[in-house]
Structures are given as structure tokens and as C-alpha cells.
Image (cartoon, rainbow, N blue to C red):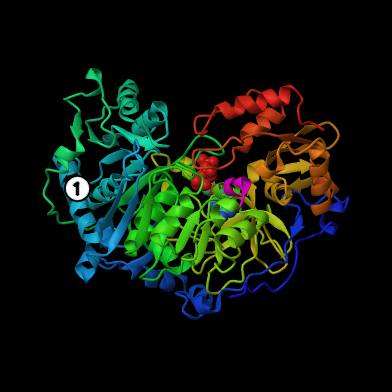
Amino acid sequence: MRPSVTSGTRTPSPGAVVSTEVPESGTLSNLSKEERRFEPPAGLAEHANLKAEAYERAASDVEAFWAEQAERLSWETTWDRVLDWDDPPFAKWFVGGRLNASYNCVDRHVEQGRGDKVAIHFVGEPVDGRPENQRAITYAQLKDEVSQAANALTDLGVVAGDRVAIYLPMIPEAVVAMLACARIGAPHTVVFGGFSSDALASRLEDCQAKVVVTADGGYRRGAASALKPAVDEAVVKAAGLGHEVSAVLVVRRTGQDLGESGWNDGLDVWWHDAVGGASTEHTPEAFDSEHPLYVMYTSGTTGKPKGILHTTGGYLTGTAYTHWAVFDLKDDDVYWCTADVGWVTGHSYIVYGPLANGVTQVLYEGTPDSPERGRWWDIIEQHGVTLFYTAPTAIRSFMKQGREIPDQRDLSSLRLLGSVGESINPEAYMWYREVIGGDRCPIVDTWWQTETGAMMISPLPGVTAGKPGSAMTALPGVAADVVDENGDSVPNGSGGYLVVKGPWPSMLRTIWGDDERYRDTYWSRFAEQGYYFAGDGAKKDEDGDIWLLGRVDDVMNVSGHRLSTTEIESALVSHPKVAEAAVVGAKDEDTGQAVCAFVILRDSAGDGGDDIVSELRKHVRKEIGPIATPRQIMVVPELPKTRSGKIMRRLLRDVAEHREVGDVTTLADSSVMDLISRGVDSGKGED
Ligand code: ATP
Ligand code: MG
């Protein structure tokens, strides 16, 4: 089938930026314009789970709409009130309702006769040349394992309300442990397995975790790497902070030698003993709709991570609804989300949303390029993946390597592609669409946050004509808008602050243990209007569709023009030699701030040639306009990213302003900053 492109090329709109008039402070200059459109495939549109009428239906009675979505779940007791917003910003959803999240994700599918359906196709790392370890887990098996783990946690003294920390690699036990916690009403806090013992200790202390679930180690690029020693250190450090952990449950994954001091009989318990030996019978108890489900710490892109609290009924409603609507989920789909369970995406779109919907999904332990660079595409081919959800950072890294690699695989099973984590640059969108999606799969660019729990702004694949780079419109039931600094909705064609104008079921309930910080961070900026402030900048285009423009903290002010990072980065990425770009504002004597860009070149561009810097400056000038032209462009081998793959612009700002770089604890690879700083100091790449 031919793609349905309704109009042509990307055109710059210089008029928007050459004006010398100083725009009203508080609005963002609107720079680029995109005219490509991709209509939904006809077959998908015809059978879409959610059709255009949903927008109006939701708007006419939003509580009734959410109540209808909550019916997707199995409740032991139905709610008597959909929403209690009597004490904003503290919301209660489905008040009086009782349910068990684990029952909803597992047992009910078995009871409905789908026990033999595969829940998880686990794809493990190939280990030491042994045949790859793969495992298919049916819903019936998942029910048994979750029940065993719930019994084991209970035996370790965990009761409803106790917190359990989970520090595991991407193995099925991570999912099992989360669901076991939910089953007994013990909120989990999953800490990404790549974090240091310090990060783990501070989270153990912050949420006073009673038990830690971990593994001896995990596999990365075919080699075993230890995890347990970091837990041992963290337990000691947490004790130093005044918090005692009472047990550590250890999955044997690698069989690594833990050494004599690596096992503490008073604390440590093997998973295969405690869980393996437990009964597969466990009756899930129903909990209040507002019972805490988990605490998840944000990525820390903008500063110290915040412990975001999600509760049960509303969160499960939001994740199940969006997963069903935005992925247009059908019973025979094979779904794959490449996020780590240590991030909110893993919580909402590997565990709770998909499993509540009874999907078959792939769970992958390893990295995208090991044992070789086509690894992900092989998995898609092998498992016949139909719905694929990943991050722009991954897409750009594949663009860097070139299309030959995916072109060698059969990706024809795919029918829909998703993106999350950052704005997807139009160029990356087109590459994703053409090379991975064979020009036939719609792309859903989903905007949401740890705080929102579920997707908020996204195309609906059967309704929306997608535009490369735009997250398009708020989902039915969600009141997202772009406002100016007075809280007034900006007209089409203008930029401003992204807000949500009313509560939604999967919203965070507070920052763990800190109601004041919750109120200050999210609800004080537009307190008068009662809006949730997301911290992101956005614009509405001429059609009223929403484009995310990056963090408000990252907005640059150049000669009185407020410029966002995203559009200039996208202009750079649209140059054929560029794979990735990060833009920050640095102090400038003449213009207040100046645009500084850091770029990674595509493999095919080699070192870019002698004129690369002036070539790129010209390109930005042509694509956007003179005001956006970077003062300085640095070609770098890597960019500082968080462990969830987001670019940490605040560190680049430190570099651009020749300051000592700030907190790097959530950085994936801290040596990256040394490389970049050295480049800056030697003046290489400056213009
Ligand atoms: P912290 O709040 O600690 O700085 P973080 O905001 O990076 O960390 P997350 O909650 O994982 O932590 O990320 C949410 C943010 O990611 C959003 O606020 C937004 O900036 C960005 N984001 C997510 N999805 C999209 C998207 N589709 N388009 C644009 N930006 C996105
Ligand atoms: Mg954030």
C-alpha cells in the first residue's frame, strides 16, 4: 500500500523569526513549520479501538468517560464517586472502589480461559556462547509465579503498606516481583539496575524499604556483571542513614561467586528457595482504589529525582486505557516496549497497562547492539512483533549506523510504531517511518511523564493524520493545553507552557513524604487557575496541534527572543551528516544568551570535513532563520544522557559557560563529560 502523504516538504518559516520585535516574555518563539501529513491506514481507521467521536464524548462528560474506561478493569467493589477533587491538588479517583492490580494483570485472564496465552516472550542475552536463553511465560505460569512470590514476601514479613525495593536486571523476575508486591498491597520502588549503591541507598532510605529484591548479577553484552555487592553496600549505607533493611531476596541469574563476605545469612534469602518453595495458591486481597501502588523516582534530567507516588485504581485505568487506545491493541498483537522496568515507561507500558490488557509481549534483557547491531530487528523478525515502542535516542543511534542494518531484516510484521521520552525530530520520525515502518505504520509520538503515569498527548492511530515531530493532541479525557505566563490559552501559531487543566486518573498523588514539594513543583506556577504545570514548553501550530519544545528550564533568551531547544536540534538533525544534536544557551555579552550546539555525526559522514561547523551554521540559518544560528558548534563523540536516554542539557550548559559540571549521578556514562569538556577547553570545533 502506498503511504498517504497529503503534502510535500518541510519548509522553513523565516518570517516567524526575523522580526526584531521583542516578543512578549513568557511565550516561546515559534520557529519551524512542518507540512508533511500521514493519514491513518484505511484498515486501521476502520477497525480502530477509539474513533474520533471519543474526543467529544470525553469532553461532554469527562467523569463519565473515565468511569467507562475504569470498567475495563475488574473491581471487587465498584466506586461510589468517580472523582473527589475537594482538596486540590490532592485527588482521589474511583472513591470507595476496591480492586487488586495483580489480579487484574494476571488472574482474570486465566479465569477468562486465556491461561495458555503467552504473556511474556523473554529474550535473554546470549551467555558465554551457550544457546541464547529464551523463555515463553503463559498467563497461567505467570499467575503461579506471582502467587509464589507473594507468599514468599509475606513469609519475609512484608504486609500491606510496607515498601519493597526492586533492583534487578530486565528478567521476568522483575515483572513477577512487581506484581507480587501489588498483590499483597506493598508499594514497590524499582531502582534501575545500572544505578550505584549510593543511588540505591538514598532511595531505600527515602521510602524506608523493608525488603530488597535483587539478583547475584545480570548480563550485559554477553558478560556477567554483579549486582549483589552494590546491594550489600547500599544496605550498609542506608543503615548509616538510620534505616535498616530486614531482608534481601536474591535471584540467581548469573551464578557468580559472591565471595565469603557476599552472603549474609541473617539477611539474604535465595529467590529459588523462598519463591521456588512457596505455594502457587494465593488469594489476592482487594485494596482501596487509592491504595499506594508504587513510588518511582523521576529520571533526574533537571535535578534531584523526585519520588512520585502512584495509587491503584486510577493508575491502572489510565495505563490500560491508553495502551489499548494509542496502540490500537488487538488480541493477536505481539507488543514490544524497549524501556527498562526501572523507568516509568517500563511500569506503565511493560507491566501494568499491557498486562491488564492481557497482551503477548517481548521482554528483552540486553542492549540494542549486542551481540551485533541488528539485534533488535532480529527480535522483531523472530517474534513477529506488531507494535513497537521505543525512544528517539535509540532511533537516532540507528540512524547514525545507517539503514543497511535494518534493511537486511524482515520487519513486515510491524503495524504501529511508538516513541516516547523526548520529542522525536522530524528527520528521525521520517527515518523511523520509512526504514523501520516500511512507510505503512503510523507513528504515535506519546508525550507523558513519570508524574502523569500514562500517556497524555498523542495521535490516535486510527484518527489522527500524523505530522513528523508533533505529539498532536491531548487524548480523549485529558485537558492538556499551552498557555502564556498569565495562564491564558495561547492562540494557534504560538508557544508557551504546557499545562493540564484538570485532574486525570493516573496523575501522581504526591511526592513521597513531601506534600509541600508536590504542591510547589506542579501546582504553584498556575495556582490561581488550578492547572498542573508540566515543566515543558510547547507550541500550538496553525491547526492547533501541539509540539513539545523542551524543558522550560532550557529555554534560551537570544536578543529578547525566547527560543526552545527542540526546534534548533531538529534543524541540525535534518542535516544529512548529523545524527544527534543538543542545544543550550550560554551567556553572551551581545545577545544575553547565545545558542551553543553539540552534535554527533552519522557514521557515513566521517569527521564531517573541514567546513562542517560553518556548513551546519548555514543549515540552521536556512532552516529556521538568523536568530537561531548557533554561535558555537562542537562535534562530539557522545552526549551526556540519563540512564533513561534523555540528553542532560544542564550539564552541557555548565560546559558552555565554563563552569564545573553539576550532579552527574543519573548519567549513563560520566566519562562523556570529560571528553566534552576537554574538547571545549582545546577550542576544537568552535567557530
Ligand atoms: P526530572 O523530572 O527528574 O528532571 P525527567 O523529566 O527527565 O526527570 P521523566 O518523567 O522520565 O523524567 O520524563 C518526562 C519528560 O520527558 C517530559 O516532561 C518531557 O520533557 C519529556 N518527554 C517525554 N515524552 C516526550 C515526548 N513524546 N515529546 C517530548 N518530550 C517528551
Ligand atoms: Mg520531569
Q: Is residue 551 left or right of residue 633?
A: left
Q: Is mark 1 within 8 Å of ligand 1?
A: no
User: Residue 585, position in %: x, y?
Assistant: 73, 38
Q: Nearer the viewer, residue 548 or 674?
A: 674
Toward the right, the furthest residue is 20
Residue tagged 1? 150
Q: Residue furthest top?
A: 260
Q: Name the foreground residue: 520 vs 153.
A: 153
Q: Is residue 355 left or right of residue 305?
A: left
For disc 1, the neighbor class at 10 Å (few under 14, some 14 to 19, many from 20) is many
Of 61 and 535, which appears nearest the observer?
535
Q: Is 398 in the magenta?
A: yes
The chief SS type of the magenta part is helix
Nearest the viewer among 543 and 132 is 132
Which residue is at 56% across, 26% downward? 671
Q: Amino acid at mark 1?
A: Ala
* Residue beneath the point at 72% across and 71% down: 7
Magenta stretch bounds: 397-403
- Give the answer, above or below, for where 656 lies relative to 283: above
Is-magenta flag for residue 199? no
Quarter of the rendering containing residue 635: top right
* Quarter of the C terminus within the rendering: top right
Q: Where residue 536 sits in the image (x, y, percent)? A: 61, 49
Q: Is residue 441 visible?
A: yes
How far from the left and from the top, in percent, is residue 360? 34, 62
The answer to which image quadrant residue 11 occupies is bottom right
Whether residue 86 is visible, yes or no, is no
Q: Give the vertical position of 113 relative to 239 (above or below).
A: below
For image coordinates 14% across by 54% down, the residue present is 282
> Left or right: where does residue 306 sit relative to residue 567?
left
